[in-house]
Image (cartoon, rainbow, N blue to C red):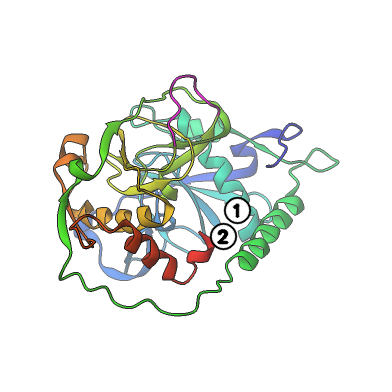
Amino acid sequence: MLDTSKWVYFKISDLFLVKKGKRLTKENQISGSTPYIGAVDSNNGVTGYVAQSPIHEGNTISLSYNGSVGEAFYQEHPFWATDDVNVLYPKFALTKNIALFICPILRMEKYRFAYGRKWTLDKMNESIIKLPTDKKGEPDWQFMEDFIKERYNRIEKKTITKIKSKSEPLNISNWKQFKISDLFDCNTTPAVHEIERGTIPYVTRTSANNGVDAFVSEVHGKLNKGNCITIGAEGRFAFYQPGQFVSGVKIYTLRNKKLNKYNALFVCTLLNQEVYRYCYGRARILDKIKEEYIKLPVDSQGNPDWQFMGNYIKSLPYSDLI
């Protein structure tokens, strides 16, 4: 992990000129090629493509102040941003790698804000972020550039799979429907509201990043054991948590003694086929999850074939990197 003890705080307005987005209603959107950036937590903020001309330049950072507050993404090309998004124009020579270093740091500030306490333009200008510095006490842009480059090189080396064969198509004709509550012990996790930065995954209702919103310090009495599946009520998506974690509000766990990281990924894929049934106004709460059914492969006794599910995932390219 990075040692941030000697890093220095900088005001966002000293580093960036912050500009607002502009509302473009669904009725006025025409399909085209201009990226339309919304206040979402996935897909680099892109919610669609419109024919309207871009209103913001590329080589900037979009930062949501409403909706999915605090979601920061590097925008390489010109775009249109909704009025729930502010855009950070650099007062320095920004590169993609530097932006990718800064965006996670900006996201670490999201816990300070919420729907009722938006990260407005004025608050954003006054917010401070902690950055590495050079000998002159200025942001060490070269360190940030080199750090991301090194991470990319490491990822490229790690993502060379030894499994080249393609898996056979699944034949689901003999699969069987199972009720979730018959397969899993389903429970609500203890919610953590006040957090401090640390090394424990903080699982929230986000639909991205395996449900992990940040890494925090351990909260006594509220640590959850790993080797389970989590689902967030409004997040809706299922994720496998290999190790211990703490969680925000309305996070549910599914546990089975036969679960492991391979068959859990098989099950999560099927659970995530059901997200279309839910929305923000119809959350995927625990009682509804318990009543869901999923179709699974079965063994000779008609029970879920956990071994087959695990072996299938192991047969997929890149499974050796899990």
* Residue occupying image coordinates x 24% and y 61%: 299
Relative side of 94 to 209, left or right: right
Q: Over which residues does the magenta segment extend? A: 217-225
Task: Give amino acid for label 1.
Answer: Ala
Pointer 2: what residue?
59
Of the numbered discs in the image, which one, if any, rests on residue 75?
A: none
Q: Does the stretch in magenta take in 306? A: no
Secondary element at image label 1: helix
Rendered location of residue 232, percent (x, y): 31, 40
Query: On the image, which quarter does residue 129 sit in?
Result: top right
Task: Give amino acid for label 2.
Answer: Asn
Pointer 1: what residue?
99
Rendered location of residue 255, percent (x, y): 32, 40
Asked whether the residues under the numbered discs 1 and 2 touch, taking CB atoms below 8 Å apart as contact, a structural biologist would say yes
Q: Does the stretch in magenta take in 222? A: yes
* Residue occupying image coordinates x 49% and y 22%: 219
Near mark 2 (Cα within 10 A), the count class, few <14, some 14-19 or many ≥20, is some
Rendered location of residue 205, percent (x, y): 34, 39
Q: Quadrant of the N terminus?
A: top right
Relative side of 283 to 196, left or right: left
Query: On the image, which quarter does residue 51 sit in?
Result: bottom left
Per the picture, the main secondary structure of the magenta-coloured stretch is loop
Secondary element at image label 2: loop
* Towards the viewer: 9 or 266: 266
Near mark 1 (Cα within 10 A), the count class, few <14, some 14-19 or many ≥20, is many
